[in-house]
Image (spheres, rainbow, N blue to C red):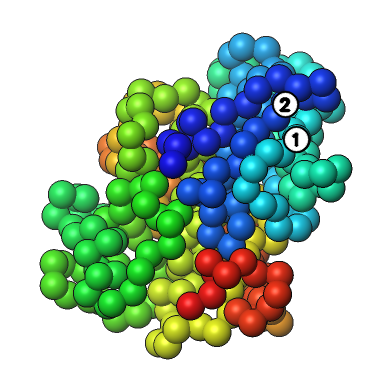
Amino acid sequence: MGTLTEATNLSPSADGFAVDLDPAWEGWGPAGGYLATIALRAAESVLPEGHRPVTLNAQFLSRAGSGKAEVSANILKPGGASLVDVALAQAGRCFFRAQIWTTSRTIGPRHLGVSMPGVPSPDALETLESHFAKLGRPLVKFWSNLDCRPVEFGSPGGERPRTDRLQRWYRFRDEEVSVTAFDLAARAAVLIDSNIWAAHWRMLETEPDYAGPSLDLTLWFHDAASHTDWLLIDAVSPIAVDAIVHGTASVWTADGRLVATGGGNCLVVPLSSPSLPDSARP
């Protein structure tokens, strides 16, 4: 199992880059935020130094498998604000596409009209593994990459009423604390994508008989803090209609800086569907 940095390492190829998709970062196939991280790495590799990510729009075209994948990154619009188109493919079939806006500009107004939610510190909360052990449920391998302290379960030994709001502290295991703007954006992408479905699951009274693989993902990156450990995600999934689960989320540093906001749609797929891997079924 590799860290997020190791599992998204790109190597040059004749047509762009190559990457080994790590099975440790799978849910119903490679996690959407993990694929978005690879796209961010590719964009960073083709852009001039000094750029930072601003917006990411991603589309999940089909499910990929672990192993080798081809990555292409093309600058559609160069300059102080640049647009990069990134595609991931296996055996000539494109399974993921993203458009990423970046900028090297820094001068402009600074205003934050929203505040970080008031929640307990991660040290005051139990781990996700502990809560799931009490419920007698195993965790999907993907979550072993993260140290997670759920706020929504409440104080040790307790559980709050089930709602569509999910608040959790996360720390990426074995990763550097001091990070670049692209590193921080990558961590936000992983957290927002994975917690849209988690917020939906959080409101259910019984275990669902369906899965929710990502259909699309849109992220806006705000404060490119260079030093972070714990990140708080505040996610909500208030809408589930006609086979689509929708959710939005924000990611904050422990000192109250807003890293990113975003959201996406999950496609409802019955757990009996042959398109899902065995690991996704109970």
Which residue occupies 19% across, 50% down? Answer: 121
Amino acid type for the residue under numbered disc 2:
Phe
Residue drawn at (57%, 28%), measured in percent from left and top? 9
SS of the residue under disc 1 = strand
What percent of the width, then of the height, locates residue 282?
48, 78
Q: Residues within 10 Å of mark 2 (few under 14, many from 20)?
A: some
Q: Earlier in the sequence, mark 2 or mark 1?
A: 2
Residue 131 % position (x, y) = 24, 68
Q: Are marks 2 and 1 in contact (CB under 8 Å)?
A: yes
Return the residue at label 2: 17
Q: Residue at x 33, y 57 (%)?
A: 168
Residue 205 sits in quarter: bottom left
Q: Nearer the viewer, residue 44 or 235?
A: 44
Q: What is the x, y in percent for residue 260?
A: 50, 43
The residue singled out by tag 1 in the image is 70
229 left or right of 47 in image: left
Instruction: From the viewer's side, name the closer residue of 258 and 170.
Output: 170
> Dot 1 surroundings within 10 Å: few (below 14), some, or many (20 or more)?
many
Distance of mark 2 from mark 1, alpha carbons? Answer: 6 Å
In percent of width and height, residue 183 lies at: 49, 30
Q: Amino acid at mark 1?
A: Glu
- Residue 2, picture quadrant: top left
Above or below, 45 against 164 in this view is above
Whether residue 35 is visible to the viewer of this picture, yes or no, is: no
